[in-house]
């Protein structure tokens, strides 16, 4: 019985569709179902000079391998034909349609996990659809769960206390209740999804030098430290708040299972420097498994065949690992 993984290629004018086609050029021992417009995939394959055979999905799990050059397809139609590199407002709903179908299938048990390609948040918002990102959207679609964004590159795991917020809004978003919920989810998911019996968590401060005893900000004293003390009393192995400029050093990382950064650009530059192109974005706290690539739509590369598949392959492998396959 082979696992079945759903893949949404994301923005149709970006590199997501061709990454799916390139991955399919190799024999698979799992069933990869691409949720997309079939004509989009055929056209992009033709532009790349690659062969692709689209097979309809069926009930149950086929026991044979998927030959090279084949993909399973769950059709979702585009509003307008898409050209590489040319964003089109009318196709913004299509991107969300693919996510809706994938989420429905995961919740129904049709897929073991969801892997998402890169989307263009700007074009979705320009189309009049409020959208902050995959993480928040999937949380809403799966029942309003509290999502935690974590990226993985090799042994380095970096989770975020806040995600897609302007920097001026970060401090106000980090409340004791929110931070305790994020850390609780992170510790639980490391045990349940990653089979780490007693995770050790490192927590960064918000301010330079972790507030320097209140002289550079009081969030560490008034918010972060009280939450950490409560979690320690519950048996959580947690260290911090640590200055972000020294946290990402072997002295700390060698003994840690994950880092919690306070905001997006505090933690992710380090992780992407360590593993860009092969890192994986994971949404914790959902009733489904969701992984994603670590890069954007790269519209300037779309249709050239120069896009690298490393992060998508890593995301597929991570999804299979988390699904226990």
Image (cartoon, rainbow, N blue to C red):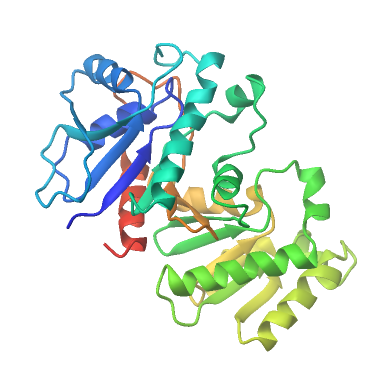
19 vs 111, nearest the viewer = 111
Quadrant of the image occupied by residue 50: top left
Give the total number of marks visible in the rendering: 0
108 vs 216, nearest the viewer = 108
User: Residue placed farthest to the right in the image?
Assistant: 215
Residue drawn at (56%, 67%), measured in percent from left and top? 186
Tell me if 68 is positioned left or right of 268 in this view: left
Q: Is residue 83 above or below residue 174?
A: above
Look at the image and tell me in which quarter the N terminus lies: bottom left
Look at the image and tell me in which quarter the C terminus lies: bottom left
Residue drawn at (33%, 50%), measured in percent from left and top? 111
Q: x and y percent of residue 119 in the render?
A: 50, 32
Tell me if 91 is positioned left or right of 267 in this view: left
Q: Is residue 244 above or below residue 296?
A: below
Q: x and y percent of residue 191 in the render?
A: 47, 75
Q: Is residue 230 above or below residue 168?
A: below
Quadrant of the image occupied by residue 307: top left
Residue 293 seen in render: no
259 vs 176, nearest the viewer = 176
Q: x and y percent of residue 190 in the render?
A: 48, 70
Residue 218 seen in render: yes
Quadrant of the image occupied by residue 2: bottom left
Q: x and y percent of residue 81 in the render?
A: 40, 11
Residue drawn at (11%, 52%), measured in percent from left and top? 63
């Amino acid at each position: 019985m082979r696992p079945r993984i759903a893949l949404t290629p994301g923005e149709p004018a970006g590199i997501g569709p061709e990454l799916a086609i390139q991955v399919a050029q190799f024999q698979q021992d799992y069933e990869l179902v691409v949720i997309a417009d079939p004509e989009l995939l055929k056209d992009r394959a033709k532009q790349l000079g690659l062969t692709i055979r689209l097979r309809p999905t069926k009930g149950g799990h086929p026991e044979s391998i998927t030959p090279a050059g084949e993909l399973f397809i769950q059709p979702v139609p585009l509003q307008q034909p898409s050209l590489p590199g040319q964003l089109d407002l009318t196709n913004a709903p299509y991107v969300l349609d693919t996510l809706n179908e994938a989420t429905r299938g995961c919740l129904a048990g049709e897929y073991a996990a969801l892997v998402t390609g890169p989307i263009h948040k700007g074009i979705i918002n320009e189309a009049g659809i409020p959208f902050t990102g995959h993480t928040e959207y999937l949380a809403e679609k799966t029942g309003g769960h509290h999502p935690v964004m974590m990226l993985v590159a090799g042994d380095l795991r970096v989770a975020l206390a806040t995600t897609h917020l302007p920097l001026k809004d970060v401090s106000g978003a980090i409340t004791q209740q929110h931070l305790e919920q994020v850390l609780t989810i992170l510790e639980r998911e490391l045990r349940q999804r990653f089979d780490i019996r007693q995770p050790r968590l490192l927590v960064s401060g918000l301010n330079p030098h972790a507030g320097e005893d209140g002289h550079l900000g009081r969030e560490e004293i008034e918010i972060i430290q009280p939450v950490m003390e409560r979690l320690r009393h519950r048996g959580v192995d947690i260290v911090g708040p640590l200055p972000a400029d020294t946290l990402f050093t072997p002295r700390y990382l060698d003994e840690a299972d994950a880092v919690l950064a306070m905001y997006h650009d505090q933690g992710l530059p380090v992780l992407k420097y360590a593993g860009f192109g092969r890192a994986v974005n994971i949404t914790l706290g959902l009733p489904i498994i969701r992984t994603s690539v670590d890069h954007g739509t790269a519209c300037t590369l779309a249709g050239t065949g120069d896009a690298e598949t490393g992060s998508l392959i890593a995301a597929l492998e991570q999804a299979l690992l988390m699904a226990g396959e």
